[in-house]
Protein backbone atom coordinates (compact mmCIF):
# COMPACT_ATOMS: atom_id res chain seq x y z
CA UNK A 1 0.00 0.00 0.00
CA UNK A 2 1.36 3.40 -0.99
CA UNK A 3 0.74 6.42 1.20
CA UNK A 4 1.71 9.91 0.22
CA UNK A 5 3.21 12.17 2.80
CA UNK A 6 1.94 15.72 3.06
CA UNK A 7 4.03 18.17 1.08
CA UNK A 8 6.39 20.22 3.19
CA UNK A 9 5.70 23.92 3.51
CA UNK A 10 8.26 25.61 1.24
CA UNK A 11 8.33 28.65 3.51
CA UNK A 12 10.10 26.70 6.26
CA UNK A 13 13.39 26.10 4.47
CA UNK A 14 13.54 29.73 3.34
CA UNK A 15 12.74 31.11 6.81
CA UNK A 16 15.49 28.99 8.35
CA UNK A 17 17.97 29.98 5.63
CA UNK A 18 17.15 33.67 6.09
CA UNK A 19 17.61 33.40 9.87
CA UNK A 20 20.98 31.69 9.34
CA UNK A 21 22.06 34.40 6.88
CA UNK A 22 21.14 37.18 9.33
CA UNK A 23 23.30 35.58 12.03
CA UNK A 24 26.17 34.62 9.69
CA UNK A 25 26.33 38.16 8.33
CA UNK A 26 26.73 39.54 11.87
CA UNK A 27 29.52 37.01 12.48
CA UNK A 28 31.35 38.43 9.46
CA UNK A 29 30.71 35.52 7.10
CA UNK A 30 30.22 36.18 3.41
CA UNK A 31 26.64 35.44 2.43
CA UNK A 32 24.98 35.51 -0.95
CA UNK A 33 21.72 37.02 -2.06
CA UNK A 34 18.61 35.27 -0.83
CA UNK A 35 15.21 35.03 -2.50
CA UNK A 36 12.62 37.51 -1.25
CA UNK A 37 9.11 36.35 -2.15
CA UNK A 38 6.26 38.86 -1.63
CA UNK A 39 4.89 37.03 1.46
CA UNK A 40 7.98 38.20 3.39
CA UNK A 41 6.66 41.78 3.05
CA UNK A 42 3.35 40.93 4.71
CA UNK A 43 3.01 41.54 8.48
CA UNK A 44 4.17 38.58 10.52
CA UNK A 45 5.43 37.56 13.95
CA UNK A 46 8.10 34.93 14.55
CA UNK A 47 10.20 33.51 17.33
CA UNK A 48 13.70 32.30 16.47
CA UNK A 49 15.04 29.57 18.73
CA UNK A 50 18.69 28.51 18.65
CA UNK A 51 19.95 25.27 20.14
CA UNK A 52 23.48 23.95 20.48
CA UNK A 53 24.06 20.27 21.22
CA UNK A 54 20.34 20.00 22.02
CA UNK A 55 20.40 22.77 24.64
CA UNK A 56 18.75 26.17 24.35
CA UNK A 57 21.22 28.82 23.15
CA UNK A 58 18.84 31.72 22.51
CA UNK A 59 15.20 32.45 21.85
CA UNK A 60 13.72 35.83 20.96
CA UNK A 61 10.54 36.72 19.13
CA UNK A 62 7.53 38.91 18.55
CA UNK A 63 4.06 38.22 19.86
CA UNK A 64 2.23 40.34 17.30
CA UNK A 65 2.66 41.11 13.61
CA UNK A 66 3.79 44.73 13.74
CA UNK A 67 6.34 44.74 10.89
CA UNK A 68 6.99 42.79 7.69
CA UNK A 69 7.70 39.10 8.30
CA UNK A 70 11.15 39.26 6.67
CA UNK A 71 12.26 42.13 8.89
CA UNK A 72 10.80 40.49 11.99
CA UNK A 73 12.66 37.28 11.21
CA UNK A 74 15.98 39.05 10.64
CA UNK A 75 15.67 41.15 13.81
CA UNK A 76 14.68 38.18 15.98
CA UNK A 77 17.38 35.89 14.54
CA UNK A 78 19.97 38.55 15.35
CA UNK A 79 18.53 39.10 18.83
CA UNK A 80 18.36 35.36 19.62
CA UNK A 81 22.03 35.01 18.72
CA UNK A 82 23.45 38.17 20.23
CA UNK A 83 20.96 39.83 22.60
CA UNK A 84 19.20 37.11 24.62
CA UNK A 85 19.94 38.25 28.19
CA UNK A 86 20.20 34.64 29.38
CA UNK A 87 23.30 33.95 27.25
CA UNK A 88 26.50 35.65 26.14
CA UNK A 89 26.56 36.73 22.48
CA UNK A 90 27.00 33.81 20.10
CA UNK A 91 30.62 33.22 19.14
CA UNK A 92 31.99 32.18 15.75
CA UNK A 93 33.32 28.97 17.32
CA UNK A 94 29.79 27.97 18.41
CA UNK A 95 28.05 28.78 15.14
CA UNK A 96 28.75 25.50 13.29
CA UNK A 97 26.98 23.56 16.09
CA UNK A 98 23.88 25.80 16.26
CA UNK A 99 20.51 24.61 14.94
CA UNK A 100 17.77 27.09 14.03
CA UNK A 101 14.04 26.79 14.62
CA UNK A 102 11.53 29.37 13.40
CA UNK A 103 8.03 29.56 14.86
CA UNK A 104 5.51 31.55 12.83
CA UNK A 105 2.82 32.79 15.23
CA UNK A 106 -0.89 33.15 14.67
CA UNK A 107 -2.66 36.18 16.09
CA UNK A 108 -3.19 35.82 19.84
CA UNK A 109 -6.74 35.46 21.10
CA UNK A 110 -7.92 36.17 24.66
CA UNK A 111 -8.50 33.16 26.88
CA UNK A 112 -11.32 34.37 29.15
CA UNK A 113 -11.20 32.78 32.59
CA UNK A 114 -12.55 33.78 35.97
CA UNK A 115 -10.03 31.70 37.91
CA UNK A 116 -7.07 29.38 37.49
CA UNK A 117 -9.20 26.21 37.35
CA UNK A 118 -11.11 27.63 34.39
CA UNK A 119 -7.85 28.61 32.69
CA UNK A 120 -6.36 25.15 33.19
CA UNK A 121 -9.47 23.50 31.76
CA UNK A 122 -9.19 25.54 28.56
CA UNK A 123 -5.48 25.05 27.84
CA UNK A 124 -4.66 22.71 24.95
CA UNK A 125 -1.35 20.95 25.73
CA UNK A 126 0.96 20.74 22.74
CA UNK A 127 -1.14 23.24 20.77
CA UNK A 128 -1.36 26.52 22.67
CA UNK A 129 1.33 29.08 23.10
CA UNK A 130 0.30 31.17 26.11
CA UNK A 131 0.81 34.82 27.00
CA UNK A 132 0.34 35.77 30.66
CA UNK A 133 -0.15 39.41 31.67
CA UNK A 134 -0.73 40.92 35.08
CA UNK A 135 0.08 44.60 35.56
CA UNK A 136 3.62 45.02 34.29
CA UNK A 137 4.34 41.28 34.59
CA UNK A 138 4.35 39.50 31.24
CA UNK A 139 5.69 36.24 29.86
CA UNK A 140 5.01 33.73 27.13
CA UNK A 141 5.72 30.09 26.43
CA UNK A 142 5.69 28.75 22.88
CA UNK A 143 3.70 25.55 22.33
CA UNK A 144 7.02 23.66 22.19
CA UNK A 145 7.38 24.17 25.98
CA UNK A 146 4.63 21.57 26.48
CA UNK A 147 7.28 18.98 25.54
CA UNK A 148 9.04 19.73 28.87
CA UNK A 149 5.92 20.66 30.87
CA UNK A 150 3.05 18.46 29.61
CA UNK A 151 0.74 19.06 32.60
CA UNK A 152 -1.29 22.30 32.35
CA UNK A 153 -0.81 23.10 36.07
CA UNK A 154 3.00 22.81 35.77
CA UNK A 155 3.01 24.72 32.47
CA UNK A 156 1.08 27.63 33.99
CA UNK A 157 3.11 27.60 37.23
CA UNK A 158 6.38 27.85 35.27
CA UNK A 159 4.93 30.57 33.05
CA UNK A 160 4.01 32.59 36.15
CA UNK A 161 7.52 32.08 37.51
CA UNK A 162 8.98 33.27 34.19
CA UNK A 163 6.83 36.42 34.48
CA UNK A 164 8.22 37.07 37.97
CA UNK A 165 5.15 35.89 39.88
CA UNK A 166 4.80 33.13 42.46
CA UNK A 167 3.83 29.77 40.91
CA UNK A 168 0.60 29.67 42.94
CA UNK A 169 -0.31 33.32 42.26
CA UNK A 170 -3.73 34.19 40.83
CA UNK A 171 -5.57 37.48 41.04
CA UNK A 172 -8.38 39.34 39.43
CA UNK A 173 -6.93 41.15 36.45
CA UNK A 174 -4.72 38.25 35.34
CA UNK A 175 -5.00 37.98 31.55
CA UNK A 176 -4.19 34.95 29.44
CA UNK A 177 -4.08 34.79 25.65
CA UNK A 178 -3.25 31.91 23.39
CA UNK A 179 -1.80 31.46 19.93
CA UNK A 180 -0.60 28.63 17.73
CA UNK A 181 2.58 28.30 15.70
CA UNK A 182 3.78 26.79 12.49
CA UNK A 183 7.17 25.40 13.53
CA UNK A 184 10.05 24.97 11.10
CA UNK A 185 13.09 23.20 12.53
CA UNK A 186 16.42 22.89 10.80
CA UNK A 187 16.87 19.33 9.59
CA UNK A 188 13.10 18.72 9.55
CA UNK A 189 12.02 20.96 6.66
Image: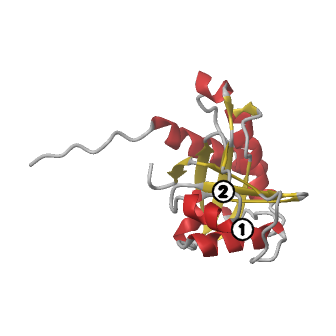
Q: Furthest residue to the top?
A: 38
Tell me the crowding category of disc 1: few under 14, some 14 to 19, or many 20 or more residues within 10 angstroms, Cα based: many
Q: Secondary structure at mark 1?
A: helix
Q: Is 75 left or right of 48, judged from the image as shown?
A: right
Q: x and y percent of residue 10 in the render?
A: 46, 36
Of the pair 44 and 161, the residue shown nearer to us = 161
Relative vertical location of residue 24 with respect to residue 54 in this rendering, above or below: above
Q: Furthest residue to the front?
A: 114
* Residue beneath disc 1: 159
* Residue beneath disc 2: 130
Can residue 68 be seen here?
yes
Q: x and y percent of residue 3 in the render?
A: 18, 46
Q: Secondary structure at mark 2?
A: strand
Q: x and y percent of residue 76 in the render?
A: 74, 48
* Label 2 close to label 1 by CB (< 8 Å): yes
Can residue 55 be seen here?
no
Amino acid sequence: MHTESAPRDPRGALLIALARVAIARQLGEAVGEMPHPPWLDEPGAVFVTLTRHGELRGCIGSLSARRPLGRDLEANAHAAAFDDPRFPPLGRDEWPDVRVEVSLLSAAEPLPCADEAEALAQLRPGIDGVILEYGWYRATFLPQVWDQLPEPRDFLAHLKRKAGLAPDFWAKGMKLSRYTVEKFKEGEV
